[in-house]
Amino acid sequence: MKCQRFLSIPIFAVLLLMGFVCYITVFIFIDDWVGLLSSAGFLNALILTILASLCLFSFSSCVLIDPGYAPASYIPDVEDSGISDQEPKKNVVQSRHCDKCSTFKPPRAHHCRVCRRCVLRMDHHCLWVNNCVGYWNYKAFFTLILYATIGSMHSTTIIITCAVQKNWEFSGSRNLKVFYVTCAAMMAALTLTLGTFLGWHVYLIIRNMTTIEYYEAIRTEWLARKSGQSYRHPYNISVYKNIVSVLGPNMMKWLWPVAVSHLKDGLIFPTPRDNS
């Protein structure tokens, strides 16, 4: 059952971290800063609760939604593959055959050694969601990082503001100071980590690449330069179309993790040649 994916130590650690951050931010720092019963305290607690709820929903969606697996009946269409014209078709067919699954891999699909299956538009296997991040759950993964980054930034701002405005001459014991500094440093580090990860995936989205394709492109680009040719990622159509291919055409649903009705079968992807 899919719910068994939650029976994982990394997932338990993520949930524990979410709960810890929400608890200390709301019941310790906001309460100590302006008080939970004040309008400012209630508003900040409400904002953080909403962000935490969206983060938890995105996290659960990413865990439970299958990334999409290559069907056993799939046969590659070399003529409509979006590959380079210089690449021999025989080599393309051979490269798309998975020896471990004994099936053909659709474009952008890769074999996951953990899941032991070929995953459609595979980005990576994520230990923290106990699942592959692929075609059907990549949007949920992206919104998870987005909401986690915003929530972490909000919590960090509250903790630092509370520490700066606190009157340490009358209420500041040494242990309390250590607690404040530790929490501020922890949240700042978490925000920096999540922000870097978010920036990385924004970069991938606007170029219509996966993490695997990015590292494959480095080698392909090097080989192209070595032979005096230029390289362009075959699925990079335009910034807006790249974003729409992941988040969907309706901007009102861009930040909703399960709004994926725009996705098709994950076997065929548009290329610049389709518009020429």
Image (cartoon, rainbow, N blue to C red):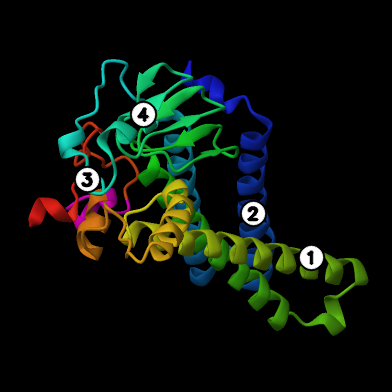
Task: Kindly report the distance in space between the C-alpha atoms of the residues bearing marks 4 and 3.
Answer: 16 Å
- Spatial CA distance of label 4 from label 1 is 54 Å
Q: Residues within 10 Å of mark 3 (few under 14, many from 20)?
A: some
Q: What number is the disc on residue 21?
A: 2
Q: Which mark is residue 94?
A: 4
- Residue type at tag 1: Thr
Instruction: Kindly state the secondary structure of the residue where label 3 is placed.
Output: loop
Q: Which residue is mark 1?
A: 182
Disc 3 residue type? Answer: Gly
In the image, is residue 273 above or below residue 16?
below
Q: How far is mark 1 from mark 3, CA to CA?
A: 51 Å
Q: Which mark is residue 82?
A: 3
Residue sitting nearer the eye, 167 or 13: 13
Q: Is residue 224 above or below residue 172?
A: above
Residue 118 placed where, x, y %? 42, 27
- Residue for point 79% across, 65% down: 182
Q: Is residue 248 magenta?
A: yes
Residue 54 visible in rendering: no
Residue extending furthest right?
A: 174
Q: Nearer the viewer, mark 4 or mark 3?
A: 4
Q: Which residues are magenta?
A: 246-255
Within 10 Å of disc 1 (Cα), the crowding (few <14, some 14-19, many 20+) is: few
